[in-house]
Image (cartoon, rainbow, N blue to C red):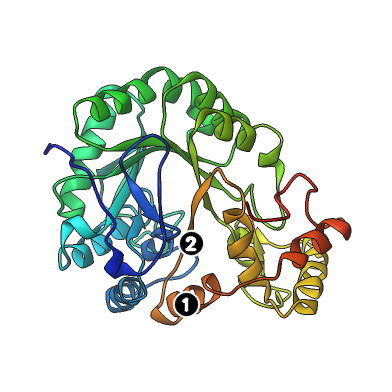
Amino acid sequence: MNVWRRTVVRKDGGMKAKRLGRSAVEVTELGFGGGPLGGLFAPLADDAAAEALAAAWEGGIRYFDTSPHYGIGHSERRIGEFLRQVPREQYVLSTKVGRLLLPQDPAGRMDEFFHVPATHRRVWDFSRDGIRRSVEDSLTRLGVDRFDVLFLHDAEEHFEAAFRDGYPALAELRAEGVVGAIGAGMYDTGMLTRLVRETDIDVVMLSGYYTLLHQSALDELLPACAERGISILAASIFNSGVLATPRPGPDARFEYRPASAEVLERAHRIADVCEDHGVTLPEAAMAFPLRHPAVAGIVVGMRSAEEVRRNLAASTSQAPERLWSDLVAAGLVDERAPQATA
């Protein structure tokens, strides 16, 4: 493994960047989430993936996140093919550990999570050796010489192993200079809070629990991160799609499943308030997490150049301050959420 060196997000990207915790790693406020490039929800051609990544780069995104899990390696491969065309010092790259990919005969089968042939199977492994093997495998798939950030991934059902063995393995890699920042990417706010309070991680990637529809991270996680100086990257800010359009349709997804009538009704009520202030639902969904001082950035999964450009435009929209207090007054947003910028 090559030694990590400090990453500087250059100004020519044109997007504001923030440091992750006490590390030297800086990420653009909008990051490219690699899940859809693995064929999440629908198949995706290599050309479409490349066009999405090119549009992200052109729009100033310099933080790219992926995982072996996403399309059993497809996302890592596609992101790597693109990033090898641009200067290494100009972007920040993260991937995740916890699952090893073992080759198998697909026998005509498709993967159970992504729309790709089942050429590999996943094996959970948060051991020191497993994590080091995962890092080496990911470096090979991506074709890069180092990562900037590594996350323990989806450890909810394997938390004790991840806490006992996985975290020390990541801390060791950071101490060796192999990686600049370490953390965990999960949806369980209680487990993430324990990691924040009892370890020396730099960042957590929170999936779906600090959004316009769900703010339970305000109970413990966000205060703990603010107290300990640990950054949050807010992922799944559209809650799998229900917040991704100005008005969600009846087939919209919420947390990877069809949205319930109750969720759709609440999303439309939020959209009503947004429209009163000349703001769309996606614009508000992207702006909301960034208002909290512990949130360094948002990570949005994107699968086409059109989607990237739409999200870039939404991310630059300026919502009036009154929007947030009106959402609180309507009982649609937790009153503990920041209602005014610092």
Q: Judging from the image, what secondary structure is the residue with disc 2 in?
A: strand
- Based on the displayed image, in which of its 4 quarters is residue 265 positioned? bottom right
Packing grade of label 2 (10 A; few <14, some 14-19, many >=20) is many
| Looking at the image, residue 180 lies above or below residue 35 | above
Kind of residue indicated by mark 1: Glu
Residue drawn at (71%, 35%) of the image: 219
Residue farthest to the right?
330
What secondary structure is marked by label 1?
A: helix
Whole-percent x, y for residue 225 in the image: 55, 34
Coordinates of residue 133 in the picture (x, y in percent):
21, 33
- When asked about the image quadrant of residue 290, the answer is bottom right
**Residue type, label 2:** Val
Label 2 – label 1 distance at C-alpha:
10 Å
Q: Quadrant of the N terminus?
A: top left
Could you tell me residue 311's position as x and y percent? Answer: 50, 73
First reached walking from the N terminus: tag 2 or tag 1: 2
Residue at (29%, 75%) from the top-left corner?
A: 54
Task: Tell me: residue 341, above or below residue 58.
Answer: above
Residue ID for mark 1: 307
Tell me if 73 is positioned left or right of 342 in this view: left
Residue 63 appears in the rendering: yes
Choose between 102 and 231: the one closer to the eye. Answer: 231
Point out which mark residue 300 bears.
2
Q: Residues within 10 Å of mark 1 (few under 14, many from 20)?
A: some
Nearer the observer, 126 or 80: 80
- Vertical relation: 152 (above or below) 48: above
Q: Residue at x 71, y 77 (%)?
A: 249
